[in-house]
Image: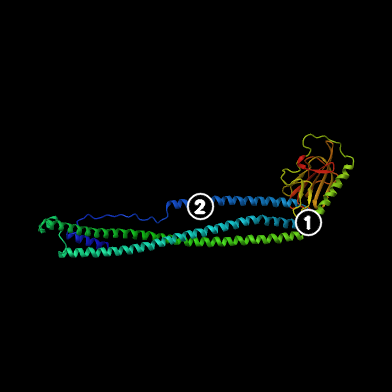
Amino acid sequence: MRSKLTALVGALAALGIASMSTVSLSYANAALTPANASAASASATGLVRADKNSDERKKLEAQQAASKKKQAELAAQLEGVNANLVQLAVALEQTKAAIPVAQTEVANAQAKLADAQAKHQQIQSRLEIANRQKQELREQIAQGEQTIEKTQVAIGQMARMAYRGAMLETSPLSLLLDSQSLDELTLRAQVAATATKSQNRAIVEAQEANAANNNARARQEAVTVRIGELETQAQQAVQAADEARAEQQRKLGEFQELQQKQVAQQGQLNNQRAAFEKQIADEQATQAAAAARIAALNQQPDAMPARSISGGIFGAPLSSLSVTSSYGYRVHPITKTRRLHAGTDFGIGCGTPIYASQSGTVTFAGWEGTGGKSTYINHGTINGSKWQTTYRHQSQFKVSVGASVQKGQVIGLVGSTGGSTGCHLHFEVWQNGKTINPLGVL
């Protein structure tokens, strides 16, 4: 169509009708591809999401660390309880700790699903806008084609009239020679000017319509490309939303399973309450027997002379001391009863040598109920007080009753006998028939 229009204009120029300069029009194509600003915004959003995910990951790691610590403390608090019951209690604690983590994961999955759905909706909105633009451009191009066609018809008629001589000569010399009077010359000049203006306007309209259509076609091509990109993005967004929905359902299922598991485990523990109470009573009986044994020792005359020691009275019973359960009163996690943990537990590998904290005489080396293999050492009177130390849960004895031992001498090996939940040494210090915090005299 553009070549046809050029040919018509050329024909008119050859006939002397069109003497104007060619009109040049330029249109700025609308930018329909993603802007740099949008890319920068997406990048910034990604960074914010990464920071948020990092914070959530740190929070979960802190929760898991706290859970492990609480489980270790629980196991220590249940010293003297049957290992199967301890395992059940620890499993319940693990489940309780896993529930808030699962809740966080469900919330994250729901947020991820919401983001995916929002992104899909956003892309769908852009796609609808792009399709409307394409339709508007299609209508604009059709209208432009009609305008060009009408202009072509008008220009064609002008060309035919000029060829047949039906149009006025517009050159100054022809006007002057063909006019019979000044009035006729003036009239002819006015008519010629009007005709020339009409001719020029028709050509300008044709050129403008052609330029507008070219611009609309370029924009239509850009919109078509953009629509293809958006359709691809829409498909990806649907897939992402489906995956997020599946993940959300999976996390929700895991959370619900944990809730059911917690109820079941709590019920099992409640059913075992009597067993817990019996084993606690056994531990209390063991501790009462120890107190009676030491009280009897204190009634006897010292086998060694009284001593005076400056500084720390006792040395470390192990090569390294890592406290896993401190001395003091605590509430039983199952029965909720308050009881005294009469010593300090030091966690260390089974088979590690145990050292006499101070010189003295072995008064007991045997099985002691929940204490397992235990050794008692009587240190006599030091700084005006009567002192004894006990070493429980050993795997092997290295001394026997009646033996005199020196400070730092190996008296046994670390184990997990009796009511123990793992390799460790339960160490007690008795002063004048009562236990005290061992860390205060080491």
| Classed neighbour count for the residue bearing mark 2: other residues with Cα under 10 Å, few (<14), some (14–19), many (≥20) | few
Specify whether 417 is left or right of 25: right
Name which of mark 1 and mark 2 comes first in the sequence. Answer: 2
The residue wearing badge 2 is 46
- As helix, strand or loop, the secondary structure at mark 2 comes to helix
Image quadrant where residue 255 sits: bottom right
Instruction: Check contact, mark 1 vs mark 2: CB within 8 A.
Output: no
- As helix, strand or loop, the secondary structure at mark 1 comes to helix
Q: Colour mode?
A: rainbow
Specify whether residue 100 is in view. yes
Q: Nearer the viewer, residue 165 or 267?
A: 165
At x 87%, y 47%, the residue is 292
At x 34%, y 62%, the residue is 140
Q: Quadrant of the C terminus?
A: top right
Specify whether residue 372 is in view. no
Q: Nearer the viewer, residue 292 or 319?
A: 292
Report the Cα–Cα distance between label 1 and label 2. 53 Å
Pinpoint residue 435: horizontal percent, then vertical percent: 81, 44
Pinpoint residue 151: horizontal percent, then vertical percent: 26, 63
Pinpoint residue 275: horizontal percent, then vertical percent: 79, 58
Mark 2 is on which residue type?
Answer: Gly
Image quadrant where residue 217 sits: bottom left
Pinpoint residue 216: horizontal percent, then vertical percent: 34, 59
At x 28%, y 63%, the residue is 148
Nearer to us: label 1 or label 2:
2
Q: Quadrant of the N terminus?
A: bottom left
Mark 1 is on which residue type?
Answer: Phe
The residue wearing badge 1 is 276
